[in-house]
Amino acid sequence: MNEAVPGRSGHRPDHRPDPVPAPGHDPVRDPWRGPMRAALAEAALAPGTGDVPVGAVVLAPDGSVIGRGRNEREATGDPTGHAEVLAIRDAARAVGEWRLTGCTLVVTLEPCTMCAGAIVLSRLDRVVYGAADEKAGAAGSLWDVVRDRRLNHRPEVVEGVLADDCAALLTDFFRAR
Ligand SMILES: [Zn+2]
């Protein structure tokens, strides 16, 4: 070990101030809570068509919402009608091309394999999700498609943003059925 010996002043050469975070403050997840609330608002509309409440938004590099989607599998009879795919399509239409470089997808539930594939293919910089999906999640739970080192594009992953709110929406939906 080559640890620096504290000087006579008691200050270590590598000393950095330790910020004291406010209770419950989470510097990684906090900036994504606002956008996650927008995704939750999308999710809340899904049960109106008998769809499982999952919602997503795509943010431009400046943080503005450029795409929205909610699970519409029942509404449209489309097996690929997941919130993430629809939000990505919406954003690509807004941008005018298929590359969503610099953009962030925010979704209430951990993406499945199909959506993880769509996230990689659209070159999104980041995926932020709320509740983990232990049974089908492909962003860390069952698979980790988005961070698979064999792929040439690997978005950053932020998980667990408002996870309890996102999970409660799903639990309430299935309990009511
Ligand atoms: Zn999916």
Image: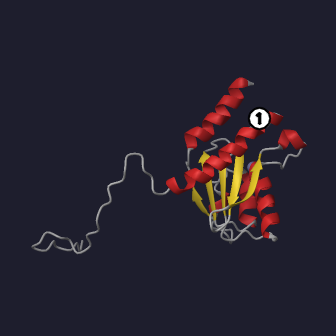
148 lies above or below 4: above
Q: Is residue 94 visible?
A: yes
Dot 1 lies on which element? helix
| Left or right of 78, for residue 85 | left
Query: Closest to the observer: 50 or 114?
Result: 50
What residue lies at 71% left-to-right and 46% top-to-bottom? 55
Q: Using the rendered view, name the quadrant where residue 96 is placed.
A: bottom right
Residue 46 screen position, x and y as percent: 77, 39
Number of disc labels = 1
Mark 1 lies on residue: 47
Specify the quadrant that holds the N terminus: bottom left
Residue 141 screen position, x and y as percent: 61, 48
Amino acid type of the residue that numbered disc 1 sits on in the rendered structure: Pro
| Left or right of 170, for residue 82 | right
What residue lies at 75% left-to-right and 25% top-to-bottom? 177
Residue 115 screen position, x and y as percent: 74, 54
Residue furthest to the top in view is: 176
What residue lies at 78% left-to-right and 48% top-to-bottom? 82
What residue lies at 89% left-to-right and 43% top-to-bottom? 76
Query: Closest to the observer: 149 or 117?
Result: 117
Model colouring: secondary structure
Q: Is residue 110 visible?
A: no
Residue 58 screen position, x and y as percent: 70, 59
Asked if disc 1 is less than 8 Å from ligand 1, the answer is no
